[in-house]
Amino acid sequence: MRLTEHFELSEFVRSSTADKLGIKNEPSNEVIKNLHVLCVEILEPLRKFAKEPLHINSGFRCPALNMAVGGVSTSNHLFGFAADVKCSDWQKCLDWQGYVMLTCNFDECICERHGNSIWLHVSYRNNMPQRYRAFYIDKGVS
C-alpha cells in the first residue's frame, strides 16, 4: 500500500525483530492514517531536501514489538506518529535535523548515534499539539 509518492506502508511495518520473534506488526486503519500524515508533513519534504531516497529503520511498532526492542511505553512509534530514518554520517543527520526544525511542523526531531548506527528520529502527532522537541543523542564510537 502506497502512503505517499515515495513511501510504502511496508517500509514502516517491517522488522527483523518481529520476524525473528513471530510478532505480527499489523497497523490499524488509524495508524495507517497517522503514517500517511507523518509522510506528508515531514518525510516527503525531507526527501525533497535530501535529494535521495530515505530508508526507514523503524516505523510503526505494535506493543509487543515495542517491548521487544526496548521502546518506552509512550513511544510515538506505537501510534504511527514516528519513524527513524537511516543516515550515512553524523553531519548528514545534523543537516537533516536542521531542515526539519526550520521548515516542518514536528513533535520530535532527534539525531541519534549508537556505535556506528546513525539515524534521525522524526515524529508528528496527528490531531495533537506538537512539542517541537529537538536534541541529539551521541553514543558513538570513542
Image (cartoon, rainbow, N blue to C red):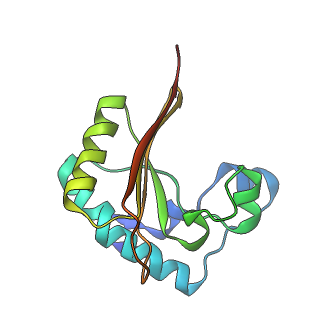
- Residue 60 is at least partly visible in this image: no
Q: Does residue 116 lie above or below 40 as drawn?
A: above
Q: Is residue 50 left or right of residue 43?
A: left
Q: Residue at x 73, y 67 (%)?
A: 63
- Residue furthest out toward the right: 21
> Residue 87: image x %, image y %?
39, 38
Question: For residue 77, what is the image quadrant?
Answer: bottom right
> Residue 128: image x %, image y %?
44, 80
Q: Residue at x 63, y 64 (%)?
A: 61
> Residue 88: image x %, image y %?
37, 33
Q: Does residue 40 lie above or below 136 as drawn?
A: below
Q: Is residue 25 left or right of residue 51?
A: right
4 and 66: which one is in front?
A: 66
Q: Residue at x 46, y 77 (%)?
A: 34
- Residue furthest out toward the top: 142
> Residue 82: image x %, image y %?
48, 63
User: What is the total number of numbered labels drawn onto the structure image?
Assistant: 0
Question: For residue 44, what is the image quadrant?
Answer: bottom left
Q: Is residue 74 left or right of residue 35?
A: right
Q: Residue at x 54, y 78 (%)?
A: 31
- Residue 71 is at least partly visible in this image: yes
